[in-house]
Image: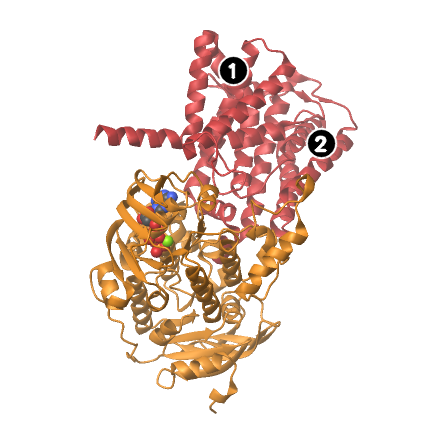
Chain colours: A red, B orange
């Protein structure tokens, strides 16, 4: 009987490989440097992960649907620049700037969704191309200048990035709220089920009467909505932005999603797992900072740890450290 | 002959999966030059036993003995090196590679500097293909082949090494009669070279035609081994499922209702031409023909997956255009597709979600999917179709082949269609469940469904159909009523022999 229970525990752990890795990492680092687990530090990490996290939520849908989105970093720069510029434009002001920016960002998302979903173009190529195209668009818009809000005391715009409610930073609240809503959308609604089906086996989904193109289209709409939200938080936090503020984030976002256990082949992953992936990434980087590693060394170590974590995940799933079928 | 040394023996093999004891102390002996059938219901553990033998799974207990030496099979390549070749139930080919590359995958002939010797590769492959008498060559891309031809590629793999034992796991499930003949010749050839052959199939007629001994598994337990010459279908069925089957031909003639679907002069490119037929409520119409006769393509057209180039489709007397599967579903058409893995299932999803996929948008409570309604549907069809799974949470990819097929059937039955189209519905299904599915089809017709059965199995078509449409090269040659039809005139019709034609 006891043996059976142990077996069940083992199986549970095997399924939660990445969670185990996370806990081990946290415990290890905390033992080594107690400041790591300090409540202020923990909140700090979550807050600084919020922007990446919000973007990762949207990309989770795209990846489960069987596609990639490499344009999110570039699109985030775009939305930050646009919202700041419109904020400074007397014809818009903060009230109109925000919805206008969401509309524009999501229009670009719709374009990507159309190309990948309806025209069935390869998502890697499309979003890689869009990464450059959007960057160009951003530079054109800004004329190559950084955007800044001139009179920062005269606007409430900073609330999204700097404000708190009930003692919790607003970015963290937005991340949490969006995660909850999207988790329910993915796990509990017919639409969510269709995303899994389309990513798991597109042909079988078609044979089940599921409109594959439309489902893929909406995954990109969701992704661009999340990017717009991230852009808003970013712009609000710094009250100004460079044209390249989101540069390189597409890979970090993807790393967080994969770290959470979504398969690049599509059809698997959850919002909760992505949140775990985001936190792991955030705590790794924070840990390295506390360890006093140089910024550039961090890049290398971060990726080594990501690869180790993914390996541990796969190894626990198949019960072996390496594949027998070479 | 004196007592032969077995080519291999299995002793007391136990294999468990979470929640399933797939093999429970199974022992088996394979002699040189024998064809040894392995039989049992869906989920009895046949494929699992063979995967243990082929090094794909490690047994929890028990021993594998090759040439009287206990061995550990660490993987498929090691099994192959020991002369044990495994032809899988589910195709495992790289569709983007050529036939030759697939056949020699992992052991491509080399020249100097490790370069692939393409000329050699092609020559070797074509030699094997010639033996198999197939209509494609070494350079053909596997993805462009029909399922049957892909199966032949899989079989060709077995002929590349000096095998001691070859395992065939349901090799004929998607072969035509002509291809089967070739396969049986290949098997006889191997047999005469002293190769031991393990052969899994649910088709009794084949078993008695080609095998020497029959071993039966039931729920992972070994039931016994008999000589094929000393038993019959009934005896084996009794061992497999513990009861007898009613295999009588369909005689029940109930009242037919209105025409549910009618097709007039339908054509689709060069796939099929000028096809006309009708199906009434309460009627089962069988479509019989060789692979490539255009039957699947007609089914796909009715389900909105292909656009006809000419002709009309009428439902309940009204002309309709069916644009998409969603359209077809809305009009009450269901299609059980022929390729369960590619078209029927999302293998990584659980059993319940697969079964309710086409109707998930309707099974809601407020904006959310209603768990309760879904589980209720799953439970109903699990019982009705006797699906063996530890629970609805099991990933479909972990079910046995036959049980996967039952999930697909349940998925479409649960839609309560007006017109049910089933394409090779009992591929890979055991005799007991097969007759249950046939009864179910009859029962559905009796309830007023219009049913179209596409099948390459003559006994199946004869058994379930009220009328049989015989097709050849994209054309309807003749339509038989169940009184007119005989095996002979049916075979003539599907071979395009016009002599069978009656005005
Ligand atoms: N990888 C797996 N994980 C969990 N369960 C499995 C796995 N593989 C097989 N099983 C279970 O083991 C049992 C035996 O399956 P197996 O595939 O050997 O049946 P089979 O006799 O080949 O049936 P069929 O005639 O339908 O092909 C089934 O209950 C199946 O669900
Ligand atoms: Mg099997």
x 42%, y 43%: residue = B56
The image quarter in which residue A320 lies: top left
Q: Quadrant of residue B255?
A: bottom left
Determine whether the residue tagged by mark 1 lies in a helix, strand or loop. Answer: helix
From what the image shows, is residue B474 above or below residue A46?
below
Mark 2 residue CB less than 8 A from any atom of ligand 1: no
Question: Which secondary structure lies at badge 2?
Answer: loop
**Which quadrant holds the N terminus of chain A?**
top left
Foreground residue among B330 and A198: A198
Where residue B40 appears, as percent x and y from the top left, is 29, 57
Residues B297 and A178: in front is B297
Q: Is residue B84 visible?
A: yes
In terms of depth relative to the viewer, which is nearer, B355 or A9? A9
Subunit that carries the residue with mark 2: A
Residue located at (42% from left, 65% from top): B424
Determine whether, in the image, residue B83 is placed left or right of residue A56. Answer: left
The residue that label 2 is drawn on is: A91
Image coordinates for residue A248, horizontal then vertical, percent: 65, 27
Q: In this picture, is A270 found above or below A191?
A: above
Q: Is residue B85 above or below residue A44?
A: below
In the rendered image, residue A208, in percent from the top left (x then y), is placed at 46, 56
Dot 2: within a 10 Å radius of its alpha carbon, few (fewer than 14), some, or many (20 or more) residues?
few
Mark in the foreground, 2 or 1? 1
The residue that disc 1 covers is A44
**Is B121 on the left-hand or right-hand side of B37?**
right
* Residue at position x 49%, y 39% in the image: A325
Determine the CA span between mark 2 and mark 1.
37 Å
- Regarding residue A166, the answer to whether it shows in the image is no
- Chain ID at mark 1: A
């Amino acid at each position: 009987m006891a043996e059976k229970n142990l077996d069940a525990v083992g199986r549970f752990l095997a399924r939660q490989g990445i969670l185990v890795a996370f806990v081990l990492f946290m415990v290890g680092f905390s033992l080594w440097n107690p400041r790591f687990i300090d409540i202020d530090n923990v909140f700090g990490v979550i807050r600084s992960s919020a922007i990446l996290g919000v973007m990762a939520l949207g990309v989770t849908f795209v990846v489960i649907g069987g596609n990639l989105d490499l344009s999110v970093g570039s699109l985030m720069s775009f939305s930050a620049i646009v919202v700041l510029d419109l904020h400074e434009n007397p014809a818009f002001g903060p009230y109109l700037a925000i919805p206008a920016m969401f509309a524009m960002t999501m229009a670009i998302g719709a374009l990507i969704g159309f190309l990948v979903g309806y025209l069935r173009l390869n998502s890697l190529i499309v979003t890689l191309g869009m990464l450059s195209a959007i960057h160009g668009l951003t530079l054109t818009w800004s004329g190559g200048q950084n955007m800044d809000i001139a009179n920062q005391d005269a606007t409430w715009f900073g609330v999204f990035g700097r404000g708190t409610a009930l003692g919790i930073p607003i970015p963290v609240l937005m991340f949490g709220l969006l995660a909850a809503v999207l988790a329910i959308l993915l796990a509990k609604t017919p639409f969510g089920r269709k995303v899994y089906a389309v990513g798991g086996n597109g042909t079988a989904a078609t044979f089940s009467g599921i409109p594959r193109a439309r489902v893929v289209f909406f995954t990109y709409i969701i992704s661009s909505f999340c990017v717009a939200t991230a852009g808003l938080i970013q712009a609000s936090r710094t009250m100004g932005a460079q044209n390249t503020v989101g540069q390189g984030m597409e890979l970090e976002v993807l790393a967080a999603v994969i770290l959470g256990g979504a398969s690049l082949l599509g059809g698997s992953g959850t919002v909760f797992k992505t949140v775990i992936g985001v936190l792991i990434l955030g705590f790794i980087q924070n840990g390295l900072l506390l360890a006093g590693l140089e910024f550039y060394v961090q890049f290398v170590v971060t990726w080594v740890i990501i690869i180790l974590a993914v390996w541990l995940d796969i190894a626990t799933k198949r019960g072996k450290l390496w594949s027998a079928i070479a | 002959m004196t007592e032969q040394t077995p080519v291999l023996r299995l002793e007391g093999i136990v294999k468990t999966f979470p929640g399933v004891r797939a093999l429970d102390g199974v022992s088996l002996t394979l002699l040189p030059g024998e064809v040894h059938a392995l039989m049992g219901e869906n989920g009895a553990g046949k494929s699992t036993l063979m995967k243990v033998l082929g090094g794909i799974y490690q047994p929890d207990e028990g021993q594998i003995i090759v040439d009287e030496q206990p061995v550990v099979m660490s993987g498929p390549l090691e099994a192959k090196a020991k002369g044990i070749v495994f032809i899988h139930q589910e195709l495992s080919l790289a569709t983007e590679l050529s036939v030759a590359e697939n056949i020699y995958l992992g052991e491509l002939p080399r020249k100097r500097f490790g370069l692939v010797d393409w000329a050699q590769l092609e020559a070797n492959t074509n030699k094997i293909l010639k033996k198999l008498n197939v209509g494609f060559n070494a350079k053909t891309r596997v993805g462009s082949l029909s399922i049957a031809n892909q199966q032949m590629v899989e079989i060709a793999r077995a002929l590349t090494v000096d095998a001691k034992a070859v395992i065939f796991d349901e090799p004929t499930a998607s072969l035509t009669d002509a291809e089967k003949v070739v396969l049986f010749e290949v098997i006889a050839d191997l047999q005469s070279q002293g190769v031991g052959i393990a052969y899994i199939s649910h088709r009794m007629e084949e078993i008695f035609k080609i095998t020497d001994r029959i071993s039966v598994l039931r729920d992972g337990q070994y039931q016994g081994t008999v000589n094929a010459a000393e038993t019959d279908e009934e005896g084996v069925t009794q061992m497999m499922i513990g009861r007898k089957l009613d295999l009588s031909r369909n005689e029940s003639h109930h009242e037919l209702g209105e025409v549910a679907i009618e097709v007039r002069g339908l054509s689709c490119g060069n796939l099929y031409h000028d096809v006309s037929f009708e199906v009434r409520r309460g009627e089962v119409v069988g479509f019989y023909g060789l692979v490539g006769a255009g039957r699947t393509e007609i089914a796909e057209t009715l389900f909105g997956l292909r656009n006809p180039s000419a002709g009309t489709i009428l439902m309940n007397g009204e002309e309709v255009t069916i644009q998409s599967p969603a359209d077809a579903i809305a009009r009450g058409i269901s299609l059980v597709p022929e390729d369960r893995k590619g078209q029927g299932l999302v293998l990584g999803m659980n059993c319940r979600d697969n079964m309710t996929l086409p109707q998930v948008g309707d099974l809601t409570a407020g904006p959310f999917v209603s768990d309760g309604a879904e589980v209720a549907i799953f439970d109903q069809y699990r019982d009705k179709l006797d699906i063996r799974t530890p629970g609805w949470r099991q990933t479909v990819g972990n079910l046995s082949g036959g049980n996967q097929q039952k999930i697909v059937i349940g998925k479409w039955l649960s839609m309560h269609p007006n017109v049910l189209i089933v394409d090779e519905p009992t591929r890979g299904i055991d005799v007991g469940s097969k007759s249950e599915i046939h009864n179910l089809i009859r029962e559905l017709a009796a309830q007023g469904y219009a049913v179209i059965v596409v099948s390459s199995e003559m006994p199946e078509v004869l058994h379930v159909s009220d009328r049989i449409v015989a097709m050849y090269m994209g054309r309807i040659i003749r339509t038989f009523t169940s009184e007119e039809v005989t095996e002979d005139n049916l075979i003539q019709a599907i071979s395009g022999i016009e002599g069978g034609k009656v005005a």
